[in-house]
Structures are given as structure tokens and as C-alpha cells.
Image (cartoon, rainbow, N blue to C red):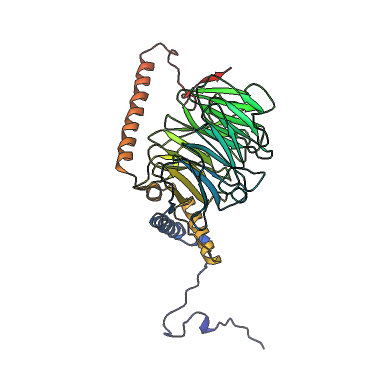
Amino acid sequence: MKVKVLTRSASDYIRETPHDIHKIKRNLDPKIHPFEKAREYNRALNAVKLERMFAKPFVGALSGHSDGVYCMAKHPKKLTTFISGSGDGELRIWDLTERITTWKIAGHKSIIKGVCCSPVKDNLYFSCGTDKTIKIWNPEQSGEEPVNTFIGKFAYSAIDHHRTNSIFATSGSQIDVWDENRSNPIKTFTFDAETTNTVRFNQTEVNILGSCGTDREIVLYDLRMNSPLSKLVMKMKTNALAWNPMEAFIFVTANEDQNCYTFDMRKMDCALNVFKDHVSAVLDVDYSPTSEEIVTGAYDKTIRIFNARQGHSRDVYHTKRMQRIFCVKYSMDSKYILSGSDDGNVRLWKTNASEKIGPKDFRERAHLEYSDRLKERYKSLPEIKRISRHRNIPKEIKNAQYKKRIMLQSRKQKEENLRKHSKKGSVPYQAERKKSIIGIAK
């Protein structure tokens, strides 16, 4: 006769020492943990606190210019090379790795208003200034003498090079398109503006170029045509223009009304986005090579970084000694930002203020990615939102922001009162993205 019984080993449920403590069976799956959300929230809170604690965006200052830095240009093929021009006519080529000047020269007799690098030939650099000259430089061959000099009839305000051909465009009293091998412009666009501030070639649709002038117009040209493609008239002057490197029809402008505007060149009667937060005129703007973000430099001595699809800045950079920002540029890898200011310094900043510089092992990268996902998941909770948005800004800017907010609220209330006490439909609502646009000129 066989008897079957259920048996179990005591080691499965009793600890070795002491014997009166029983083991507890646990399912270690984090998805069914009773305190999963509380635990993740605590980790997200610690992650966002550490992010603000280690937020040190300033990398270093590249000193050498004795006057304000009015223009800069990054090399399209060399990651660590860029050129800058100052108010005393000096040109400098910098090495970002060593943070030193590799070449310098007193290239012009007055303010240098524009510089650019040739995407066609690696060692060619172009500069123009208010001394009515355009000069081509090759530091490796010509040394201190320019390869070529073009003499114009008026002061030049900007210069930009075509992406694939050996031609470049300059702005001033008119838009001139030059060939590197000819002494006279091959094409000229004239219009009513006294001075054109900026000219920029589209990097995708390479025959399209945009300009903005003192008559508040934003004008688009096609090299294959003799007349402008379209003209947009704003309420205030536009200081700078930058094309989206990924989407050929999109461009962003920096305006005197303290805002930046994104437009689609196919339908320019309404802005795609409005970037706010500056408290003074925006002097320069640039897209990141990934087109996900833009950086702006303003008269209020601050640099702001915006997500290209959001209206308010995600970060603001400033120092005590930095003066008005004349030019800002992204590095070609999108990890750094360059700024040139009125105090004669070129400053290097990190795009992400708390990002670690240097190599990271696998475990560190995994931990940082996990922390970023946690911050993204819990970003709308009040405490995490408050900590992540907090920035220390100068007292003058904070006071200016307070006054600006009161002024905007007063204007809104005045318009609402006028609408309330007027005939229905006589005071229509106006979209925020259309308020600064007067119309399309013909």
C-alpha cells in the first residue's frame, strides 16, 4: 500500500538564522509594486533638483578682440573652426578645441559687418564692412594679404555664401550677387529700403535668399528671377533672419518688438510661431543644425534658447560682464552656442546647461536617460515644474518683465473694454500671430 503526502522543505520558508523569522515571497516586478508612482516621483524630484544644481552652461570666454564682436560665422565642414569680426576691423579665426586664435589680421579700416566661410573651398573666408570693401582671405596661402578685394559704392551690412556654387551675396543699399572670379556683381536687386540689414541663402533651396531692411520689410528673392518673390511688411524693423536647415520653406526672424517670428515662405500673412520672453530688441537668431531649437541674442544682454515649436524659452544665459549680444551661432554638432557681445568677448556655452562634458560609460548614460524619462513623465506636477522652470536672472530684467506684463495686460483690458462698449463686430479679435504683420507688399 502506497501513501502519498504533501511535503516541503523548511529552508523554503524559514531563514537560516534566526529560525523564527519566516521568508516573505515577493514579486519583484516594478509594475505591480504598490509604491511605484511614489518611488518614481521621488526619483524625478531628485533628478530635477540635481539638474538645476549642476546647471553651469558657461564653458569659457575667447578673449582677444579689443572692440565689440559684430559678426561671426561657423565653418560648414570644420567642426572646431569659426571666424569673427569686430568693430575695429580685426578678423580672427578660432580653434574651439584649444580656445585660441589661429589667425588674425586687421582686415578692414572700419566696422566689419559680415563674415562667412566658403562651403565650396575649405580655406576661403569672406568679409565685408562699412569701408565699402569686400575681401576674400586664404590664411594658408596669402597670409596677411587678401586673395581678392572688391570695392563697392556703399557700405556693406552682411554677406553670405551660396552652398554649392562659387557665388556670394552682399547687402547694403541694394542686394548684390557676386562671382568670386569677377570684379563686378553678376546680379543686383534694388528696392526702396535705405539699408538692408541681413542677407541669407537658403541651405536647401539654394537659389532662394532672404533679406530684411530698415523699411520693416522682409524680402525673398530667387536668383533665377529679376523681381522679388514676396515682400512682408512688419510693424517694426527686423534685425536678423535664419533659414531652417531641415525644412526649406521655414525661416525665423528677430524683430525690434522683443519677439522672434517663424514664417512659411509659401503663406506669410500669418506667423507659424511667436517666440517671446526678451525684454529688449532681438539682434540675432540662429537655428540649430537639427532644426529642433533656436537661439537668440538681444539688447537686454541675455541669450535665450527656444524649442522651435514652443513660444517661451526653455533657458536663459547671462553673465555679469556680458554686454549687448550682437551675434549668436550654434556649433555644427548642436552641443555648443557661440555668442559675440559689445564687450569684445566671444563666449562659449553648453546647449544643455547641466550636460556633462566628456565621455560617459554605459551605466552613466543609462542612468541619465532614465532620469530624463522620469522628468518628462512628471514634468506637469507642481513641485517639479516649479524647480525646472526656476532661473536666476538679473534684477533689471526681472523688473522689465514685470512692467512688460503689466503693459500687455493693460492693452488687452483696454481692447476688451472697447469691444464691450462698441457695436458688435466693429472691434474684431486679432490673432497673436497676425498682430505684428501689416501685410504682404506687392
Can see residue 128?
yes
- Name the one closer to the observer, 95 or 308: 95
Quarter of image, res 180: top right
Relative to 186, say whether 328 is above or below: below
Q: At 50% from the left edge and 51% from the top edge, which residue is drawn?
A: 336
Can see residue 330?
no
Q: Position of residue 217 (x, y in %)?
A: 52, 23
The residue furthest front is 145
- Name the one closer to the observer, 285 or 134: 134
In this image, 163 relative to 38: left or right?
right
In this image, 410 relative to 114: left or right?
left
In this image, 362 relative to 281: left or right?
right
Q: Position of residue 399 (x, y in %)?
A: 30, 37
Relative to 19, say whether 31 is above or below: above
The residue furthest top is 423
Q: Quadrant of the N terminus?
A: bottom right
Q: At 47% from the left edge and 74% from the top edge, which residue is drawn?
A: 24
Q: Position of residue 350 (x, y in %)?
A: 47, 52
Q: At 43% from the left edge and 85% from the top edge, which residue is drawn?
A: 17
Q: Position of residue 369 (x, y in %)?
A: 52, 58
Q: Quadrant of the C terminus?
A: top right
- Name the one closer to the observer, 434 or 224: 224
